[in-house]
Image (tube, grey):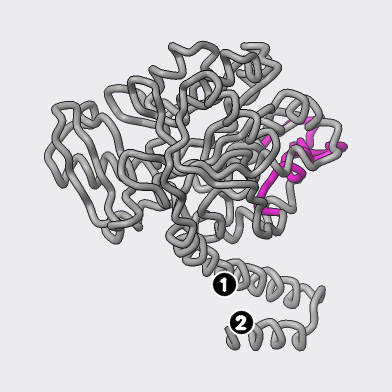
Amino acid sequence: MVEELRKNVWTVNRCSGCGMCVSACAKNVLQFPEEEEHPILETKERTIGLSHVVIDTCFFCEKPCEESCPRLKEWKDGPVIRAVSVISKLPNGNVIDALLVSALRCGFIDGAIVWDVEGTSFKPLPKVATSENEILKSAGYQYLWFPVLTALNEAIYEKELRKIAIVGPPCVAQAVKTVLSSTNKKLEIYRDRIRLVIGLFCDGIYSHQLVTNEIVNRFNIKPCDINTITVDFRNALLRIILYDGSEKTIPLSDVRKYMRDGCARCTDFASEWADLSVGNLGSEKGKTTVIVRTPIGENCLDYAIREGTIEIAKTPVNMEEIQRFVSDKKRREQAQEIDSLLLSTLDALSGKKSRKEIEEMLKSIGRK
């Protein structure tokens, strides 16, 4: 069984919801039900003679699901090559679209896993885009949860893509980094096919109940009236832009209850393990911050500048503003320490750890 995932991730509500383990499952027995906090392992039973047995579906498995889980790794600060403020030259003004379109034109990628929504319900959906038109027509990231990496197998096995870009929040970037640094043979195809990761600034991701229980009821509108949902970090507001051009706002403090439990354990605000991190903080209104973190990200940005889809602004990035939010989110490390204490307490009850070790952990957390 997937004991590491069950004990160290699912039991303590640490699951990021990225969906990487579901894609990587070698036996296709992990599923991610809608609105659940973590995947579930399918139970298979068999009757043999007079006996009824539950089959261990993970028997003789190399556990690529555990190898690919970002919550089973410790994360330090990610690299920074440079940070620039940019303007998209596309008609829609979207910087991520501009990066993807230029990468597609240059043959750097042959497709991308992006975010879209179902029109009538505004449910988030992953979309495997293989053309400029499909990229431009996607709704983009709406801060609503979906295990987006479950679309990897569609991109690889159905669309037969060989150079894939992925757009997502920090947990997605961490999951991809985990896969790329693994030596597990079952993950080799993902290591070979993923070419680029564009990460987003993110303080947390919300369940679809934010739409059905909060936005719809608060403003007496239908989900199909919503055009875009964005998070205004500076003013701590959720901004809902409707198709009629009007805008509604909700204080972030009012919608925290819809945030996924696993987000409370995430300390990465600026997608520090992506190739490129993108967000509005640190730049003037109408401009977007792009943090280059890898040589691959540098190449992608250069392609966009050369193709004319992106223009570098003259104003520098205010990294101090970004760092304030980065530091605020890193304070969630204490939640991770409490998780470790809980797991160690369970080990102590089973005799695997001593009472003295638990007391030392309690003192350490108390000092902080």
State yes or no: discs 1 and 2 in contact (Cβ < 8 Å).
yes
Q: Is residue 363 above or below residue 106?
A: below
According to the image, label 2 marks what residue? Answer: 365
- Residue farthest to the front? 314
| In front of the other: 235 or 206 | 235
Q: Is residue 71 left or right of residue 234?
A: right
The kind of residue tagged 1 is Gln
Magenta span covers which residues? 43-72
- Label 1 crowd bin: few (<14), some (14–19), many (20+), radius 10 Å: some
Report if residue 235 is visible in the image: yes
Q: Quadrant of residue 256?
A: bottom left
Q: Residue at x 41, y 40 (%)?
A: 288
Q: Is residue 302 left or right of residue 288?
A: right
> Residue 360: where, in percent of width, then height?
71, 86
**Could you tell me which secondary element the residue under label 2 belongs to?**
helix
- Label 2 crowd bin: few (<14), some (14–19), many (20+), radius 10 Å: few
> Residue 254: where, in percent of width, then height?
26, 58
**Could you tell me which secondary element the residue under label 1 belongs to?**
helix
| In front of the other: 168 or 224 | 168
Q: Is residue 165 above or below residue 156?
A: below
Report if residue 42 is visible in the image: no
| In front of the other: 7 or 283 | 283
- Mark toward the start of the polypeptide (1 vs 2): 1
